Image (tube, rainbow, N blue to C red):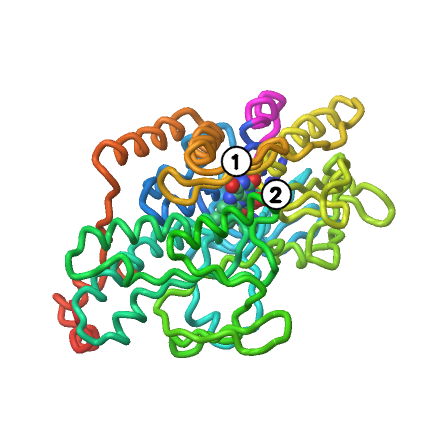
Amino acid sequence: MAFNQLAKDRPRLLIVGGGYVGFTLAQQLQTRIKESGGVVTVVDPNPYMTYLPFLPEVAAGNIEARSAIVPHRQHLKDCELIGGRVESIDHANRTVSIRGIDQGPDFDLPYDEIVIAGGSVTRTFPIEGLAENAIGLKTIEEAVSLRNWVLERIEIASLTDDEAEKRKALTFIVVGGGFAGIEAIGELEDMARTAVERNDRLKVSDLRFVLVEAMGRIMPEVTEERAEKVVADLRSRGIEVLLNTSLDSAKDQLVKLINMKDKSPAGEMYTDTLVWTAGVQASPFVKNSDLPVDERGRVRAGADLRVTGDDGPIKGAWAAGDIAAVPDLTGAGPGGFCVPNAQHAVRQAKTMAKNIMATREGKPLEDYYHENLGAVAGLGLYKGAATIRGVDFGGLPAWAAHRLYHGYAIPTIERKVRVFSEWGINMLFGRDTTGMRHVRDPRRSFKIAAGDEVDKAKARL
Ligand SMILES: Cc1cc2nc3c(=O)[nH]c(=O)nc-3n(C[C@H](O)[C@H](O)[C@H](O)COP(=O)(O)OP(=O)(O)OC[C@H]3O[C@@H](n4cnc5c(N)ncnc54)[C@H](O)[C@@H]3O)c2cc1C
């Protein structure tokens, strides 16, 4: 079934995913391709690109959720935008199957060239209770929900006389010592500390933050020396950092840990809050395609970012970002491939834009080559860690570098202004530690008012 209102008579460059790669590429090509008589079509279930490095700051309330996303309709005006999810790709027949969001239609869409830019999803393991009880930090909704949840736990804890309940509410566990996990625990602890300081029924020492990491070190993106300093800093803030430790089970709010070296039990604790940030894997839809996929589920790409099978590049198919196995020509990447990060995603998109135009103009293609610049992390207000071109530093300078870099790197001037303004407002008036209630069930009060008996019975406003 073809969907009637979409462009039919123009050659279509179809971009699957409007995140880092898709948004940057569409920005670069939309006008040129439109002027040449073609159309750039972006399919994404979200009408925005999420600036993922800001999720920990959204979870801590330093940045408003809407400022950490970049709307497609506002900034990709020359593109054809489709709110849907690509379910499968039939490249031999140049067609994708799309599932429209919510109750939207399912339809097939023809294309001339395709760009696979669907990013990654949280990687999980079959751990008892994990799917039911944990939350990830990979979407803007998760970040918003986490903030409200943590602040609500603090309110709940401040009203109970039951010590076990209080301890459970105030125990926050983050699994995964990569960038996302470390930034998440650093920012959340900072926010929770301020919230507790404003609540005279609680003490900061009531809070318990636990970081669980399966490897013997955290943050592979920074030097080992800096990573050890970060661990020391976190511990000096009272955060428990458990290395060589993993999650054994998370059933009925009881989290059991296991020592990764000898598989012995490594403690257990009750908690309402389990945040899982232990890595990502390529978005799985690409397995429903006739494009070559490696053993880790990534689309195989050449250094020029064309999808590449055993017999060489596949005509009309491109891939980049977290979903693609792109050779790292610097030789630094694990297994010879680029690591999944934004630094690569944005630069790959720019190289791809040049190469897409070059194929049309019959010019030679460029190989993607990028030497890692380093990494910057924010760990709460005025706290950070950074390794930039081999020089590592922490504290206030690293925090400032993190803010300057990401404030500058978020696409579009309009979003940069929003982010810097919000940081400024927070510095002027202090951090906002008010949680919003029932964000996950906004119809709750209406249902109760309208006499929904089930909700009335459960109601604890
Ligand atoms: C919390 C966090 C912090 C991070 N911090 C940093 C950092 O400080 N520095 C850094 O370099 N990197 C960081 N990263 C990693 C970086 O954000 C990613 O590597 C980058 O976003 C990858 O870009 P991408 O375009 O491949 O994927 P994404 O930006 O994730 O975009 C993928 C898009 O595809 C869409 N999509 C998925 N499936 C489908 C489908 N079936 N059909 C259509 N569309 C689909 C998604 O909705 C999404 O919009 C962080 C990641 C996280 C989660």
| Residue at horizontal 29 percent and vertical 30 percent from the top | 424
Residue corresponding to mark 2: 223
Residue 62 in view: yes
Q: Is mark 2 within 8 Å of ligand 1?
A: no
Quadrant position of residue 34: top right
Q: Which residue is mark 1?
A: 393
Residue closest to the far right: 311
Q: Quadrant of residue 439?
A: bottom left
Q: Is residue 247 above or below residue 19?
A: below
Q: Determine the quadrant in which ligand 1 lies.
A: top right
- Callout 1, which amino acid? Phe
Say whether residue 407 is left or right of residue 375: left
* Placement of the C terminus among the 4 image quadrants: bottom left
**Residue occupying image coordinates x 53% and y 78%:** 265
Label tally: 2
Alpha carbons under labels 2 and 1: distance apart: 10 Å
- Amino acid type, callout 2: Thr
Magenta residues?
28-45
Q: Does residue 43 sit above or below 416 in this rendering?
A: below
Decide if residue 446 is on the left or right side of residue 360: left
Residue 248 position within the rendered picture, expressed as x and y whole percent measured from the top left: 53, 75
Q: Does 205 sit left or right of 84 as displayed?
A: left
| Residue 76 seen | no
Q: Is residue 404 above or below residue 338?
A: above
Q: Residues within 10 Å of mark 1 (few under 14, many from 20)?
A: many
- Residue at 15% from the left image edge and 68% from the top image edge: 448
* Residue 416 in picture, x, y percent from top left: 40, 28
Residue 266 - label? none
